[in-house]
Image (cartoon, rainbow, N blue to C red):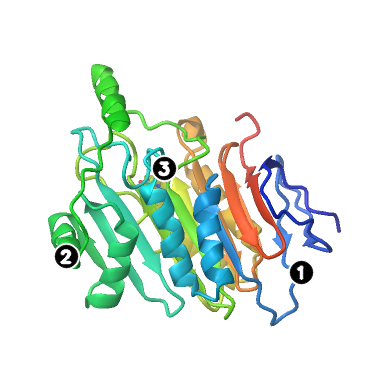
Amino acid sequence: MKRRDFLHTTSLTGIAVASGAALMSCDHKNKEQKPVVSTSEENEITPIAIATWNVPEAVNKAWEVIENGGSALDAVEQGCRVEEANEEGQSVGVGGLPDRDGNVTLDACIMNAEGDYGAVVYLQNIKHPISVARKVMEETPHVLMAGKGAEQFALSSGFEKENLLTEASKKAWEEWKVTAKYKPIINIENHDTIGMLAIDKEGNISGGCTTSGLAYKMAGRVGDSPIIGSGLFVDNEIGAATATGMGEEVLKTVGSFLIVELMRQGRSPQQACEEAIERIVAKNKDRLQDFQVAYIAINKKGATGAHAIHSGFSVTSYTAEKQEIYNSSHYLSDS
Ligand code: SD4
C-alpha cells in the first residue's frame, strides 16, 4: 500500500490530501498514475465528477450540481455545456474546428443510470449538442438523430440557430487549406473532446460526451464520441467509461463498453482502461505514433482509472475529498 502518486499539473482550491486511499500496485511500465481504490466501504457512496482533459470549470460545474443534491445526469449535462460554450476549446461546441469544407459539425451523447441513451451526430448550428442529445433521450422514441433532422428537432425544441465557426477557428481552417494535408495528429493538448462521468449522492451513475470531432475531417465523418459503447457507456450496476482521441480506433474496439464489461468481470477501472488500450495497441503496433487514444473509467464504488497510448493525457477529477488534475498513465515509453 502506498499513497497516491498523481502528477498534479494544476493546483486547485479546496484540495484536500487523500487519507488512507488504498492503492493497487501495477507492474505496467510508465505508470504516472496508480490505480485508485476507493476508501469507501462496500455500500458507501462516493460521489464524483471526472472528465477527460484539463477542464476544471466544467468539472467544477458538475460537482456543484452533485453537491447541491442534483442528479449525475444533470451534473454531466451541465458540465459538458461549460465546454461547449467555451469558444477557446477548439474541439467542442462553439469554436470547434470545422471539417475540411469549413462546417462545424458536432457529435454528442448522454446516458443515464437507467441505461437510457440519447445522441446526436453531424449536428450543425446548435451550441449545446449534449442538451439536444438529452432531449432525444427523454422526448423522442429514438436514441440517435443525425444531421438536418437533428437540427430541426433541436430548433423545434427551442434551441437557437447559431454560428459556431469563430474567427480563430476559421483562420486555423484557412491556414490548413494552404496544404490541406489531412493527417490527424496525436492529440496531447490539455483541452479536447470532453467525456464526463459522474456519481451523485444517491449513488447513481451517468455520463456524457461531446465533441466537434477530428479537425478538418471529411464531410460526413462521425467519430466514436456519440456512439453508445464506443465514446461512452454507463451501466449503473457496474460503472462507466468514456473515450477521447482517434475515434476510428475506439469504434473498432467498442472501447467504453469493453471497459465496463471488463469491470463486470472483476477488473479495476485502471486495469480495464489498460486492457482496452492494449486491444488497440495490439492491432496498430507499427502506427502507434500516428494517433492517441485515452480512456477514463469509474466503478460503482467511485474508484477511477485512466490510461492512454501516449503521455500528455490529463484527467480532471472532483470528489468531496479531493479536486485534482493529473496526467494519466500511458502505454508508450517514448512519447
Ligand atoms: C472523434 N474521439 O471524433 C473524437 C475526437 C477526440 O480528442 O476525442 N479528440 O474521434
Task: Find out whether the residues at labels 2 and 3 contact each other: C-beta distance under 8 Å.
Answer: no
Residue farthest right in this picture? 1
Q: Is residue 281 left or right of residue 165?
A: right
* Distance of label 2 from label 3 (alpha carbons): 29 Å
- Quarter of the image that includes the C terminus: top right
Task: Find out whether the residues at labels 1 and 2 contact each other: C-beta distance under 8 Å.
Answer: no
Where residue 46 sits: x, y (%)?
66, 72
Where residue 123 sits: x, y (%)?
22, 53
Tell me what residue is drawn at x 39 percent, y 56 percent: 81
Q: Amino acid at mark 3?
A: Met
Q: Is residue 127 left or right of residue 313?
A: left
The answer as to whether callout 3 falls within 8 Å of ligand 1 is yes
Instruction: Please give the residue where the numbered disc 3 appears in the rendered image.
Output: 246
Say which element carries label 3.
Answer: loop
Q: Is residue 254 visible?
A: no
Instruction: Please give the residue where the numbered disc 2 appears in the rendered image.
Output: 153
Tell me what residue is drawn at x 70 percent, y 55 percent: 14
Instruction: Please give the residue where the numbered disc 1 appears in the rendered image.
Output: 39
Tell me what residue is drawn at x 43 percent, y 73 percent: 112
Q: Is residue 227 left or right of residue 257?
A: left
Q: Which of the two marks, 1 or 3, is nearer to us in this view?
A: 1
Residue 272 vs 28, above or below: the answer is below
Q: Residues within 10 Å of mark 3 (few under 14, many from 20)?
A: many
